[in-house]
Image: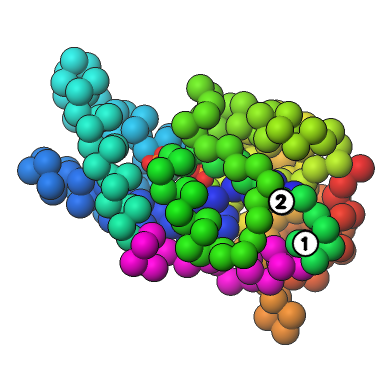
Protein backbone atom coordinates (compact mmCIF):
# COMPACT_ATOMS: atom_id res chain seq x y z
CA UNK A 1 0.00 0.00 0.00
CA UNK A 2 1.41 3.38 -1.03
CA UNK A 3 0.56 6.54 0.86
CA UNK A 4 0.84 10.19 -0.07
CA UNK A 5 1.96 12.48 2.77
CA UNK A 6 0.68 16.05 2.51
CA UNK A 7 -3.08 16.20 2.81
CA UNK A 8 -3.28 12.39 3.25
CA UNK A 9 -1.29 10.98 6.20
CA UNK A 10 -1.17 14.48 7.69
CA UNK A 11 -3.30 17.60 7.15
CA UNK A 12 -0.12 19.63 6.72
CA UNK A 13 -0.82 22.30 4.14
CA UNK A 14 -2.94 25.07 5.72
CA UNK A 15 -1.41 25.12 9.22
CA UNK A 16 2.00 23.63 8.33
CA UNK A 17 3.52 24.46 4.96
CA UNK A 18 1.55 27.69 4.41
CA UNK A 19 2.67 29.05 7.81
CA UNK A 20 6.28 28.07 7.05
CA UNK A 21 6.19 29.76 3.63
CA UNK A 22 4.83 32.97 5.19
CA UNK A 23 7.48 32.89 7.94
CA UNK A 24 10.16 32.54 5.25
CA UNK A 25 8.79 35.54 3.34
CA UNK A 26 8.79 37.54 6.58
CA UNK A 27 12.35 36.50 7.48
CA UNK A 28 13.47 37.57 3.99
CA UNK A 29 11.61 40.90 4.53
CA UNK A 30 9.44 40.24 1.50
CA UNK A 31 5.88 41.63 1.32
CA UNK A 32 4.27 38.34 0.22
CA UNK A 33 1.79 36.48 2.44
CA UNK A 34 -0.34 33.51 1.45
CA UNK A 35 -3.78 33.47 3.09
CA UNK A 36 -5.77 30.22 3.14
CA UNK A 37 -7.60 30.91 -0.14
CA UNK A 38 -4.55 32.03 -2.08
CA UNK A 39 -2.70 28.95 -0.83
CA UNK A 40 -5.52 26.69 -1.98
CA UNK A 41 -5.03 28.01 -5.51
CA UNK A 42 -1.23 27.77 -5.33
CA UNK A 43 -1.44 24.14 -4.12
CA UNK A 44 -2.37 23.06 -7.65
CA UNK A 45 1.36 23.48 -8.41
CA UNK A 46 3.09 20.62 -6.57
CA UNK A 47 6.54 21.15 -5.09
CA UNK A 48 7.26 24.04 -2.73
CA UNK A 49 10.09 25.62 -4.72
CA UNK A 50 8.04 25.50 -7.95
CA UNK A 51 5.12 27.02 -6.04
CA UNK A 52 7.29 29.94 -4.86
CA UNK A 53 8.78 30.43 -8.32
CA UNK A 54 5.37 30.49 -9.99
CA UNK A 55 4.04 33.00 -7.47
CA UNK A 56 7.08 35.28 -7.85
CA UNK A 57 6.64 35.13 -11.64
CA UNK A 58 2.99 36.14 -11.24
CA UNK A 59 4.27 39.15 -9.26
CA UNK A 60 6.71 40.22 -11.97
CA UNK A 61 9.96 39.09 -10.34
CA UNK A 62 12.55 38.64 -13.14
CA UNK A 63 13.75 35.11 -13.88
CA UNK A 64 17.35 35.83 -12.82
CA UNK A 65 16.12 37.06 -9.43
CA UNK A 66 13.72 34.12 -9.06
CA UNK A 67 16.53 31.64 -9.80
CA UNK A 68 18.35 33.02 -6.74
CA UNK A 69 15.37 33.72 -4.46
CA UNK A 70 13.14 30.63 -4.90
CA UNK A 71 15.75 28.02 -3.83
CA UNK A 72 16.93 30.19 -0.92
CA UNK A 73 13.37 30.80 0.30
CA UNK A 74 12.53 27.11 -0.08
CA UNK A 75 15.57 25.97 1.90
CA UNK A 76 14.64 28.35 4.70
CA UNK A 77 10.97 27.29 4.59
CA UNK A 78 12.06 23.65 4.87
CA UNK A 79 14.12 24.46 8.00
CA UNK A 80 11.10 26.23 9.52
CA UNK A 81 8.85 23.26 8.76
CA UNK A 82 11.37 20.85 10.31
CA UNK A 83 11.18 22.87 13.53
CA UNK A 84 7.36 22.82 13.38
CA UNK A 85 7.46 19.03 12.95
CA UNK A 86 9.82 18.70 15.94
CA UNK A 87 7.46 20.93 18.00
CA UNK A 88 4.56 18.56 17.18
CA UNK A 89 2.58 21.16 15.22
CA UNK A 90 1.58 18.56 12.58
CA UNK A 91 -0.28 15.36 13.55
CA UNK A 92 -1.77 12.34 11.75
CA UNK A 93 -5.26 12.62 10.28
CA UNK A 94 -7.95 10.79 12.27
CA UNK A 95 -8.00 7.10 11.37
CA UNK A 96 -4.48 7.02 9.87
CA UNK A 97 -2.74 5.40 12.85
CA UNK A 98 -5.52 2.79 13.11
CA UNK A 99 -5.30 1.91 9.41
CA UNK A 100 -1.49 1.68 9.34
CA UNK A 101 -1.43 -0.48 12.47
CA UNK A 102 -4.02 -2.81 10.93
CA UNK A 103 -2.10 -3.06 7.64
CA UNK A 104 1.18 -3.72 9.45
CA UNK A 105 -0.59 -6.39 11.52
CA UNK A 106 -1.68 -8.03 8.25
CA UNK A 107 1.92 -8.02 7.02
CA UNK A 108 1.16 -5.48 4.29
CA UNK A 109 4.17 -3.75 2.79
CA UNK A 110 3.91 0.01 3.29
CA UNK A 111 5.46 2.75 1.17
CA UNK A 112 5.35 6.52 0.78
CA UNK A 113 5.26 8.53 -2.46
CA UNK A 114 5.42 12.28 -1.83
CA UNK A 115 6.33 15.47 -3.70
CA UNK A 116 7.64 16.91 -0.43
CA UNK A 117 11.33 17.31 0.49
CA UNK A 118 13.27 14.56 2.24
CA UNK A 119 14.54 17.11 4.79
CA UNK A 120 11.17 17.27 6.57
CA UNK A 121 9.51 14.06 5.32
CA UNK A 122 11.74 11.61 7.23
CA UNK A 123 11.53 13.43 10.60
CA UNK A 124 7.78 13.90 10.12
CA UNK A 125 7.12 10.19 9.54
CA UNK A 126 9.20 9.32 12.61
CA UNK A 127 7.54 12.01 14.79
CA UNK A 128 3.94 11.59 13.65
CA UNK A 129 3.84 7.80 13.04
CA UNK A 130 6.36 6.31 15.48
CA UNK A 131 6.81 2.56 15.07
CA UNK A 132 5.32 2.46 11.56
CA UNK A 133 7.90 1.05 9.14
CA UNK A 134 7.63 2.28 5.60
CA UNK A 135 9.71 -0.10 3.45
CA UNK A 136 10.16 2.50 0.70
CA UNK A 137 9.94 6.30 0.94
CA UNK A 138 10.37 8.29 -2.27
CA UNK A 139 10.32 12.10 -2.03
CA UNK A 140 10.40 15.02 -4.42
CA UNK A 141 14.19 15.14 -4.02
CA UNK A 142 14.56 11.79 -5.83
CA UNK A 143 12.46 12.47 -8.92
CA UNK A 144 12.54 15.06 -11.73
CA UNK A 145 8.79 14.96 -12.43
CA UNK A 146 6.37 16.20 -9.75
CA UNK A 147 2.76 14.96 -9.48
CA UNK A 148 0.69 14.78 -11.70
CA UNK A 149 3.79 13.23 -13.31
CA UNK A 150 3.71 9.51 -12.34
CA UNK A 151 7.49 9.21 -11.76
CA UNK A 152 7.36 9.05 -7.95
CA UNK A 153 4.93 6.10 -8.09
CA UNK A 154 6.96 4.34 -10.80
CA UNK A 155 10.07 4.60 -8.60
CA UNK A 156 8.17 3.26 -5.57
CA UNK A 157 6.94 0.24 -7.57
CA UNK A 158 10.49 -0.44 -8.85
CA UNK A 159 11.92 -0.32 -5.32
CA UNK A 160 9.09 -2.50 -3.92
CA UNK A 161 9.40 -4.86 -6.87
CA UNK A 162 5.62 -5.25 -6.92
CA UNK A 163 3.34 -5.06 -9.97
CA UNK A 164 1.00 -2.07 -10.20
CA UNK A 165 -2.00 -4.43 -10.22
CA UNK A 166 -1.20 -5.66 -6.70
CA UNK A 167 -0.74 -2.18 -5.21
CA UNK A 168 -3.20 0.47 -4.05
CA UNK A 169 -2.46 4.16 -3.49
CA UNK A 170 -4.10 6.47 -0.96
CA UNK A 171 -3.99 10.11 -2.09
CA UNK A 172 -5.77 13.39 -1.34
CA UNK A 173 -5.68 15.46 -4.54
CA UNK A 174 -6.43 15.54 -8.29
CA UNK A 175 -2.68 15.88 -9.01
CA UNK A 176 -1.85 12.86 -6.87
CA UNK A 177 -4.74 10.84 -8.31
CA UNK A 178 -3.66 11.66 -11.87
CA UNK A 179 -0.07 10.60 -11.14
CA UNK A 180 -1.13 7.31 -9.52
CA UNK A 181 -3.52 6.48 -12.34
CA UNK A 182 -0.84 7.25 -14.94
CA UNK A 183 1.32 4.67 -13.14
CA UNK A 184 -1.51 2.11 -13.46
CA UNK A 185 -2.45 2.06 -9.77
CA UNK A 186 -5.85 1.63 -8.12
CA UNK A 187 -6.39 4.80 -6.11
CA UNK A 188 -8.39 5.78 -3.06
CA UNK A 189 -8.75 9.54 -2.48
CA UNK A 190 -9.34 10.81 1.05
CA UNK A 191 -10.24 14.46 0.61
CA UNK A 192 -9.46 17.39 2.90
CA UNK A 193 -10.51 21.03 3.08
CA UNK A 194 -8.31 21.93 0.11
CA UNK A 195 -9.19 19.01 -2.17
CA UNK A 196 -12.90 18.28 -1.63
CA UNK A 197 -13.70 20.30 -4.80
CA UNK A 198 -11.00 18.67 -6.96
CA UNK A 199 -11.94 16.58 -10.03
CA UNK A 200 -11.74 13.06 -8.57
CA UNK A 201 -13.82 11.22 -11.17
CA UNK A 202 -10.96 8.82 -11.98
CA UNK A 203 -10.69 7.60 -8.38
CA UNK A 204 -11.74 4.05 -7.47
CA UNK A 205 -13.05 5.21 -4.09
CA UNK A 206 -13.44 8.70 -2.59
CA UNK A 207 -14.01 9.38 1.12
CA UNK A 208 -13.99 12.63 3.05
CA UNK A 209 -11.95 11.03 5.85
CA UNK A 210 -10.35 7.72 6.87
CA UNK A 211 -13.18 7.01 9.30
CA UNK A 212 -12.99 4.93 12.49
CA UNK A 213 -15.29 2.23 13.89
CA UNK A 214 -18.35 4.08 15.17
CA UNK A 215 -17.26 7.26 13.38
CA UNK A 216 -17.58 6.54 9.67
CA UNK A 217 -16.50 9.10 7.08
CA UNK A 218 -18.71 9.99 4.11
CA UNK A 219 -18.32 7.75 1.07
CA UNK A 220 -18.34 10.27 -1.80
CA UNK A 221 -17.97 7.78 -4.69
CA UNK A 222 -17.34 4.00 -4.78
CA UNK A 223 -16.74 3.35 -8.49
CA UNK A 224 -15.39 -0.17 -7.92
CA UNK A 225 -18.25 -1.23 -5.62
CA UNK A 226 -16.01 -2.02 -2.66
CA UNK A 227 -19.00 -1.66 -0.32
CA UNK A 228 -16.94 0.60 1.95
CA UNK A 229 -19.17 1.78 4.80
CA UNK A 230 -17.08 4.84 5.64
CA UNK A 231 -14.12 3.22 7.40
CA UNK A 232 -11.04 2.74 5.20
CA UNK A 233 -9.56 -0.58 6.28
CA UNK A 234 -7.51 -3.50 5.02
CA UNK A 235 -10.55 -5.36 3.65
CA UNK A 236 -11.58 -2.40 1.48
CA UNK A 237 -8.04 -1.89 0.20
CA UNK A 238 -7.69 -5.62 -0.48
CA UNK A 239 -10.81 -5.51 -2.68
CA UNK A 240 -9.06 -2.92 -4.87
CA UNK A 241 -5.98 -5.06 -5.53
CA UNK A 242 -5.87 -7.40 -8.57
C1 LIG B 1 2.44 18.02 -1.72
C2 LIG B 1 3.33 19.07 -2.24
C3 LIG B 1 4.54 19.44 -1.45
C4 LIG B 1 4.21 20.35 -0.29
C5 LIG B 1 5.36 21.24 0.08
O1 LIG B 1 3.12 16.88 -1.48
O2 LIG B 1 3.08 19.58 -3.30
O3 LIG B 1 5.39 20.07 -2.32
O4 LIG B 1 3.09 21.15 -0.54
O5 LIG B 1 6.49 20.50 0.39
P1 LIG B 1 2.39 15.43 -1.49
P2 LIG B 1 7.92 20.97 -0.16
O6 LIG B 1 2.79 14.76 -2.74
O7 LIG B 1 2.88 14.72 -0.26
O8 LIG B 1 0.90 15.66 -1.42
O9 LIG B 1 8.02 22.44 0.14
O10 LIG B 1 8.91 20.16 0.59
O11 LIG B 1 7.92 20.70 -1.64
MG1 LIG C 1 -1.08 15.23 -1.13
Q: In x, y percent, where is residue 153?
A: 66, 34
Q: In the orientation shown, which residue stands out farthest toward the right?
A: 242
Q: Inspect this view and state whether residue 192 appears.
A: no
Magenta residues (range) = 85-103
Q: Residue at x 72, y 40 (%)?
A: 202
Q: Quadrant of ligand 1?
A: top left
Corner quadrant of residue 218: bottom right
Q: Name the residue under label 1.
A: 103
Q: Residues within 10 Å of mark 1 (few under 14, many from 20)?
A: some
Upstream in the sequence, badge 1 or badge 2?
A: 1
Question: Who is closer to the viewer here, 104 or 184?
Answer: 104
User: Is residue 26 positioned above or below 99 on the image?
Assistant: above
- Establish whether ligand 1 lies closer than 8 Å to the Cβ of label 1: no
Q: In x, y percent, where is residue 121?
A: 47, 48
Check residue 96 for magenta coloring.
yes
Q: Which dot marks residue 218?
A: none
User: Is residue 207 positioned above or below 152 on the image?
Assistant: below
Corner quadrant of residue 61: top left
Amino acid sequence: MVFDVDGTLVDSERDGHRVAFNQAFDDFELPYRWDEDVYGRLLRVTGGQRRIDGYLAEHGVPEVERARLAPALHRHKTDILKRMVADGVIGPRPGVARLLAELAGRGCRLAVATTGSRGWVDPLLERVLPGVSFEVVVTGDEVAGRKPDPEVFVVVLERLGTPAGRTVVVEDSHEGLTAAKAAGLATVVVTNGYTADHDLTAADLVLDGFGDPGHPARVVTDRRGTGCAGVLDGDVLERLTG
